[in-house]
Image (spheres, rainbow, N blue to C red):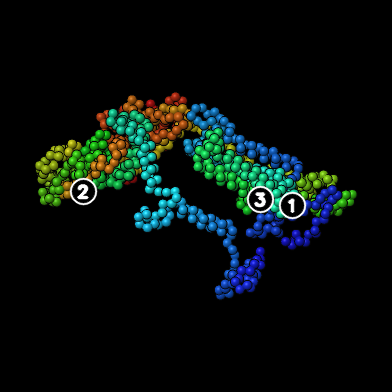
Amino acid sequence: MTKETDKSPAGEKPEVDAYSGVDTTGHEWDGIKELDNPLPRWWLWIFYATIAWAVVYMIFMPALPAPPGFDGHTRGLRNHSERANVTEALAELQASRGPMFARLQQAAADGGIEAIERDPELLNFALAAGESAFGDNCATCHGAGAQGFIGYPNLNDDVWIWDGTFEGIQYTLHKGIRWEQNPDTRFSQMPAYGQDGLLSREEIAAVADHVMTLAGMIEPTEAGRTVGTEIFNQQCSTCHGADGTGDRTIGAPNLVDRDWLYGSEPENIRASIYRGPYGVMPAWEERLDEEVITALAAYVFLLGGGEREAFTEAALDPAISGGADTDGAAGR
Amino acid sequence: MELIKNRPAPKAKAADGVAVHDAEPVNSPERRELYHKREPIYPKLVHGKFRSAKWIFMILALGVYYLLPFVRWDRGPGAPDQAVLVDFANARFYFFFIELWPQEVFYITGLLILAALLLFLVTALFGRVWCGYACPQTVWTDLFIAVERLFEGDRNKRMRLDKQPWSFDKAWRKISKHAVWLVIAAATGGAWILYFHDAFAVLENFFTGQAALTSYLFFAILTFTTYTLAGTMREQVCTYMCPWPRIQAGLTDQQSLNVMYRVDRGEPRGAHKKGESWEGRGDCIDCKACVAACPMGIDIREGAQLECIGCALCIDACDEIMVKVNRPKGLIAYDTDLNIERRMKGEKTQFNLLRPRVILYAALIAAVSGLMLFGLINRSELELNSYRDRNPNFVTLSDGTVRNGYTLTVLNKAGEPRTLDVSLQTDPMMRMRVIGATEAAPTRLAVPADTTQDFRIFLSLPPEAVDRASEDVTFVVTDPATGETARTEAVFITGEGGR
């Protein structure tokens, strides 16, 4: 193990450490001498190889900053561009999805949502494409599972302020809601009764009482029965109907169901009357492709709340409901 | 170093007609230093029953490895007809009549457990026979040494050749050896990729440059590893890289049959002249044939040691000598520590193969293989999984109905498409809706052959039935044609009384 080679510049032999038999470098700190253990050969070879690799890489790939006017960096012999790769990959992806999207459009135009549902391949495609587009564009407001938040509708339930049919959802997606840049947008506006000084706080509280009575949430109060009823009939019934069931055609919510977009606490209801809610959804036809909107509409429709003539929960044949099969035999 | 230095220098002859091999064990404990540069080992060719067994096993093992991908197996249309195929692209594993899905990789786990237990059993019984005969490292190294011997001659010739200065003769021998090594290494890497795609197609695509990049990559990796591990590293892989030698020590005991030098019979060793009496001395004539034959570079006479792979070539080597000097065979033989002790004490020897650990390993092997066999025989061709929507957990509809969404995953492992019926076992009030089902057949699920298909299902509970936080649900799918069923349990959440 002992190395007899002479490495010191002065020509004298390096001192050999008695315990390990290794040369010392001649450095000494506080009586501790540094041994001259060379790096392992394999380590050095890998080190040299990485240097060689770096040089080759610099020649072939974009690597060095270049002066302005030279695109910011050297091009490299391979003329590699990650941006071009991504563009190309995206174009390829679009092309590969093209036929399915075309089929989806055709089916939606010919037979609506039923035509999509009849074709398992198309159905799975629409659900997958819709879910991904939903995650990218809609989840910010409506939540990842379309469960909604206060002020942002839950799209899983069967409550629709405007229109819950497949065509209706498509229209909403295209034109948006209160999206003023689009002339065809769905539009309605509830006055801000408190903010604009149309009603006093006491009057608002009375109307709120009346509304909650209509919805069966509280027992009638004195103020609600008198002042509240009168104001409701004068101000609210035009849009929400005398019984408070709302009007889909003008986007006036049903006030007697159990769904409260802006919260169901008394203070939430009073705040809505005070401020006059003004929820906005963009018109997606300005940003998304026609086919993507179709897939989105199908996805939202099939979240479970989509409306159609027949075949809703209520119309289900009792024979296929659960419980009939208690012994685990064939289903029907 | 002391022991080696203190030994007398080998005499020219160990016995009449028996040459002393100028062989020093490269890996003897005294010479083993950390960070020691590899000393080449030149194993000498021996003849005998163990060497023959090794040749036969090598031919069998290599034959299976190289030819298996070409064996065909008819699985009908649409399925690959390769007997053994790891089909990553379609996530299937085919082994003759067995077809495994990704959900069934536990069979692979079972196989690995079985392999480990078998290794334990065999090691407890016979030491490192796996290492000596079946380990790929041994098989390929043995093949590479055979090639080396073909071009450079046996032990002495090889040693002389390595000491010679470079000449045309030396050059062509060395170049030919490395060329053949490379061909074998390439064939090894080449055969590997055949297991992952249709072998004939891969072969064609490979040579026309159209195979997948991964094919070339794995070809290159395995060619490189075969060449280096079997060509240049050899015994170092076993000694320094493999964990098995360390584990093995814990698996053998005093009664395990191991390759052993019968020290009771061999010592004291020394040269022997023909006609001389064998009285008062051992049978070992110190010819070192066993050291020369050892591919691990050890001296078996120093007792059981970490490097010994149990290949038993030293037994063959010693037996040849014993015949020559007219002594009984088996100075080096499969024996147990206990028996050597017994003989030294003058007791009778006995072999006790059925020890508790052996019985335990055998029982475990029987249990695991029984379990796997049971699983394979009862393997269902229909499986069902359900995933409940978690976001939102449940939906309350305008009339108070509570609804949960589920994704039902049906695995149809049969070779033909199926039409299944889905039903429920739960609260009789529960209603079910299958997205994509027709009104005429609202519970029908159509699953194509040999695929996994997802279905969206909604369950809803009318307001009058919503009086508890959750409800257990069992989905059942039934194939009306065969009566086969599969079920999966799920939970229906109502949100009543908190989530």
Q: Does label 1 lie on the same chain as label 3?
A: yes
Which residue is pictured at 54% across the width and 35% down the height?
A: B204
Is B345 left or right of A233, judged from the image as shown? right
- Please tell me which residue lies in front, B12 or A199: B12
Specify the amino acid type for callout 3: Glu
**In the structure shown, which secondary structural element does the residue marked by tag 1 occupy?**
helix
Residue type highlighted by circle 2 = Asn
Tell me how far mark 2 sits from mark 1, CA to CA: 99 Å
Q: Position of residue B8 (x, y in %)?
A: 80, 59
x and y percentages locating residue A225 in the rendered image: 12, 43
**Disc nearest the viewer among 3 and 2:** 3
Q: What amino acid is found at the position of numbered circle 1 in the picture?
A: Arg
Q: Chain of mark 1?
A: B
Judging by the rendered image, the residue that carries numbered circle 1 is B160
Q: Which mark is residue A268?
A: 2
Mark 2 vs mark 1: same chain?
A: no
**Which residue, given by chain and number where applicable, does mark 3 sit on?**
B235
